[in-house]
Image (cartoon, rainbow, N blue to C red):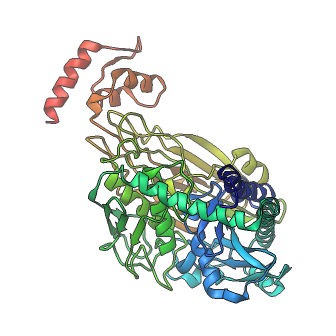
């Protein structure tokens, strides 16, 4: 080595910090709330071969596809990549998720030598298509979902490609938002590239390249070390995607077989349903990303996610299936499929690595669009966001409440005040969902939320997709399942439960009530510490009826105390009844 190990560590961390600065530069300068409030994006960096060397925290479902986008540029453009170029890509099958998630890729050069690529993948609120907001639960093919950008040059040698920019803006219902987000993405990437250039000028090109190589080698070495600590063998899980698939009420069967050896972590989705003419299909890069999430949780959630760390991971998903669709399969609500790529591995392994994985959670992103033309300003507006819900219990703790689902794990819930100030809606109720409850157990699941949007405009268009309704969050070791997700809409005084609505017109005074599920429980509810049951009752999370019938705990409602003798007798009787 031409540099000492300590300096090499400084360079490695400098690459990570460059990505973190890119992340916050984009968050501070973007036009859309889905970026600057929700953080629905991810950024990263690869070496010159497209191997992931660094990234900042972002949407997990995006983070795992960045290296696919880098390799797509290298394979398609080869020797036609020049300093100042910026590529734009959103076609899902080779490197993406759904069309709204647009990746910008910028090559980094030093004295005409390509040293790596910078990537920024963010959710654009509008890319055209048959429904406002572009993702559409009723789509039957990708052509209905919006503009496809097949890895083309957005900037050529530092100059905007005006023709491509004009096509993008002409196809967006929110061109100002789209242009603002696009320019913010590109600007943030220049910040990262500049920081890498500073590292090169300070420490030398060969040392920076050496640091990239060392990141990959260290990641692979560490992954193989952690792999040896995992239980070995074959583990299987099956489930059904029940995301109200367009054109049918039949759920999709999905399965996974996980094989763990000292050298490999193999996930095989063979046997899962074929792709469908409904947008819940998970593109193969997104499937890989979904598996990478749970792989990291099992191996080490604090490890750097790099190409080296992912080297032992092998994923098999036959072409033409829901986990590896081919054109023209729609993918605009792909998070439903991606989530099951994560959850099947999670479900198969949770009982075997209880210190690393919890019981099942509410899983569905329950992504929501509320938008239209603001009566007061005449300007378009759009709320685009995931919803939080309940996570599953662990073997030694209750589940987390009101957290976004696994695929959106680093996103936030936008401020109610920001929405009400900027848009003609009222968040009439936002509370912990104690009405539908949780999966009970020795340790109970976390609670979901109830969130009500009241329309204050003459009209607004609403789009929602709901999964984990008929097949609720799963439990472990005798715990109870969660209640499942649902949405209730109120129009003209009439209530209706829905699973899927696409750009449906709501008028002034109409209301959308989103009710996310609590997580699954872990262990027999009759083994729960009665003091914890009492605490939940005091906090108004459960009723006296639940305390007695589920947990076998008798609480004096006047003294707010446990009747220990009655509790012991009741639990004895319930154990006999339940076998």
Decide: is 528 above or below 568.
below
Percent position (x, y) of residue 205?
A: 75, 67
From where the camera sits, is residue 495 visible? no
Decide: is 180 above or below 406.
below
Q: Between residues 260 and 37, which one lies in front from this camera angle? A: 260
Decide: is 120 above or below 457.
below
Q: Residue at x 81, y 76 (%)?
A: 111
Percent position (x, y) of residue 134?
A: 63, 73
Q: Is residue 561 left or right of residue 37?
A: left
Percent position (x, y) of residue 312?
A: 43, 64
* Residue 62, picture quadrant: bottom right
Q: Residue at x 13, y 36 (%)?
A: 579
Percent position (x, y) of residue 117?
A: 69, 72
Q: Quadrant of the N terminus?
A: bottom right
Q: Between residues 418 and 294, which one lies in front from this camera angle? A: 294
| Residue farthest to the front, as pictured | 2
From where the camera sits, is residue 491 visible? yes
Q: Is residue 102 left or right of residue 64?
A: right
């Amino acid at each position: 080595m031409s540099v000492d190990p300590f300096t090499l560590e400084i360079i490695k961390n400098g690459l990570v910090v460059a990505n973190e600065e890119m992340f916050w530069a984009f968050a501070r300068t973007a036009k859309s709330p889905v970026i600057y409030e929700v953080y629905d994006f991810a950024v990263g960096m690869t070496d010159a071969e497209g191997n992931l060397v660094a990234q900042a925290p972002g949407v997990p479902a995006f983070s795992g596809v960045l290296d696919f986008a880098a390799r797509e540029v290298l394979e398609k453009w080869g020797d036609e990549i020049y300093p100042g170029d910026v590529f734009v890509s959103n076609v899902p099958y080779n490197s993406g998720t759904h069309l709204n998630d647009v990746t910008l890729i910028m090559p980094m050069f030093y004295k005409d030598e390509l040293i790596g690529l910078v990537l920024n993948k963010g959710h654009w609120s509008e890319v055209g298509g048959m429904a406002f907001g572009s993702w559409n639960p009723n789509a039957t093919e990708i052509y209905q979902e919006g503009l496809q950008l097949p890895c083309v040059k957005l900037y050529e040698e530092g100059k905007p490609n005006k023709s491509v920019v004009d096509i993008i803006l002409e196809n967006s219902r929110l061109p100002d938002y789209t242009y603002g987000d696009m320019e913010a993405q590109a600007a943030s990437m220049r910040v990262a590239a500049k920081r890498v250039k500073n590292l090169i000028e300070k420490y030398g090109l060969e040392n920076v390249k050496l640091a990239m190589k060392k990141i990959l080698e260290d990641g692979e070495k560490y992954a193989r070390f952690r792999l040896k600590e995992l239980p070995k063998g074959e583990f299987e899980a099956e489930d059904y995607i029940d995301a109200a698939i367009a054109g049918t009420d039949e759920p999709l069967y999905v399965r996974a077989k996980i094989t763990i050896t000292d050298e490999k972590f193999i996930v095989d989705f063979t046997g899962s349903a074929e792709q469908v003419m409904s947008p819940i299909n998970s593109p193969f890069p997104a499937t890989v990303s979904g598996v990478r999430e749970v792989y990291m949780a099992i191996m080490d959630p604090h490890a750097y996610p790099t190409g080296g760390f992912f080297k032992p991971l092998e994923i098999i998903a036959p072409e033409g299936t829901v986990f590896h669709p081919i054109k023209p399969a729609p993918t605009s609500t792909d998070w439903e499929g991606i989530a099951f790529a994560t959850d099947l591995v999670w479900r198969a392994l949770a009982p075997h690595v209880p210190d690393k994985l919890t019981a099942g959670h509410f899983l569905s992103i329950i992504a929501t669009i509320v938008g239209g033309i603001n009566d007061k300003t005449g300007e378009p507006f759009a709320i685009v966001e995931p919803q939080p819900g309940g996570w599953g219990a662990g073997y030694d703790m209750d589940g987390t409440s009101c957290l976004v689902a696994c695929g959106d794990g680093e996103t936030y819930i936008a401020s109610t005040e920001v929405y009400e100030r900027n848009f003609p809606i009222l968040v009439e109720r936002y509370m912990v969902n104690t009405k539908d409850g949780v999966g009970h157990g020795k340790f109970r699941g976390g609670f979901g939320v109830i969130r009500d949007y009241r329309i204050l405009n003459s009209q607004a268009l609403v789009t929602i997709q709901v999964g984990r309704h008929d097949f609720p969050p799963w439990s472990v070791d005798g715990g109870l399942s969660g209640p499942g997700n649902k949405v209730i809409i109120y129009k003209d005084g009439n209530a209706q439960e829905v699973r899927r609505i696409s750009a449906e017109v709501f008028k002034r005074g109409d209301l959308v009530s989103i009710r996310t599920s609590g997580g699954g429980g872990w262990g027999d509810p009759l083994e729960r510490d009665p003091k914890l049951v009492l605490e939940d009752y005091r906090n108004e999370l459960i009723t006296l009826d639940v305390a007695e019938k589920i947990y076998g705990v008798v609480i004096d409602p006047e003294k707010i105390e446990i009747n220990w003798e009655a509790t012991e007798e009741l639990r004895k009787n319930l154990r006999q009844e339940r076998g």
